[in-house]
Amino acid sequence: MNKRFVFTAALAALLSFSVHAQTLPRTQLKVVGGLSNLSAYNDYEKPFWTKVVPTLSNGQVTAEIKGFNEMGLKGPELLRLMSQGVVEFGTATLSYFSSDNPINEAVDLAGLAPDAKTARAVVDAFAPVYAKFYGPGSGIKILGMSPYPAQVLFCNAEIKSLADVKGKKVRTSSRTQAEFIEALGGSGVTLAFGEVVPAMQNKVIDCAITGSLSGYSAKWFEVATHLYALPINWNSQIHGVNQKAWNKIDPKVQAFLQTNITSMIDNMWDAAAAQTQQGYDCNSGAAACTLPVKGKMVIVQPTAADRVLLKKLMQEIVLPKWAARCSATCVQDFNATIGKAVGMTAKK
């Protein structure tokens, strides 16, 4: 299903760009993508760079791509390597850089976007702020931002509501997730994505947060028993390029890449809700799962009270804590963009 999204868009774009592609100069690119075992990489990034781009450019533009984990990288160093020019094109998960600057958390605070449509509105509203922040002086040019499927709780113990998080050790991938878990009486634990399965197996942690389909791709269903289907956030990614490397690319190739990267990202947003549901279906072994391996997890549907609680904790705990550590300008930018989109106000 996901690959169909990619190649349908590619075919449409091919009709638009085939004439222009004939005039593109030959260009070879190197890309470091996201985690290579996840659907975002395998269904979108990798086919985009290795098949769609060469096809649309009539073979004039080609690219090599590897997931950052295949390069021996952990993820948090990617923006630095991109700004230094060690990495040309790269995909970086914003939550990895929350300690560098709280502005990186702005679009993905826990409880901010309860659905994919709201998440897209939030990212689009704040995009000009990031474009300025990662502008001249940063060494990076942002080409777009995409989501993972909804970030949800996987637990190796029964969980019926958010109240059951109390006393549990939960792997979180960002400060805002950790603050949300702590507000529920749980303990946030920092673990690399690849360390979650053995940690849950050995009872080092009770639960972990990741995308519903990401957890499936990493076989978390083998060690977790319950999935609480309440979107906490969306773990947005930046697709960027080293500014000096970008400046060396022919303007016609720049325009070609930017247009088609935007199309790829639109496809990823369009599929976010469907991929979230597919994660639920495949982790639980539902008939609707179209993937070969099916888990046996219990999918727990969130209560209306927990949806209200998620928003309440966001407004009363998560947002104020974030505003306290972000700059006054950062908070003003949030209120002028995201705040207007979701009807919330951050106070310094």
Image (cartoon, grey):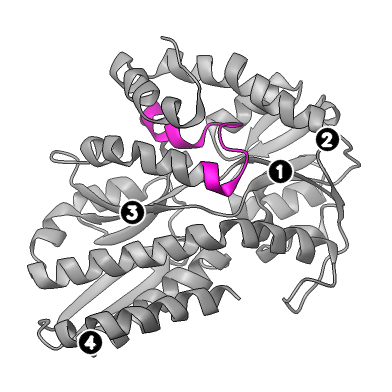
The reply to whether the magenta stretch includes residue 103 is: yes
Find the distance from the CA under tag 3 to the CA under tag 2. Answer: 34 Å
Q: Is residue 43 above or below residue 244?
A: below
Q: Position of residue 278 (x, y in %)?
A: 70, 64
Magenta stretch bounds: 100-118
- Which amino acid type corresponds to the residue marked 4 in the rendered image? Ser
Q: Is residue 37 left or right of residue 62?
A: right
Q: Quadrant of residue 325?
A: top left
Does 293 appear in magenta? Answer: no
Q: Picture coordinates of residue 76 (x, y %)?
A: 42, 45
Spatial CA distance of label 1 from label 3 is 28 Å
Q: Residue at x 24, y 35 (%)?
A: 133
Expressed as whole percent of the image width and height from the top left, the position of residue 73 reads 43, 56
Q: Measuring from the top left, give residue 346's x and y in whole percent.
A: 46, 16
User: Which callout, 1 or 2, points to the residue nearer the camera?
Assistant: 2
| Number of residues whose C-alpha sits closer than 10 Å to that of mark 1, classed few (under 14), some (14–19) or many (20 or more) | many
The 10 Å Cα crowd at callout 4, few under 14, some 14 to 19, many 20 or more, is some
* Residue marked by disc 1: 208
Which comes sooner in the sequence, label 1 or label 4?
Answer: 4
> What residue does disc 4 label?
18
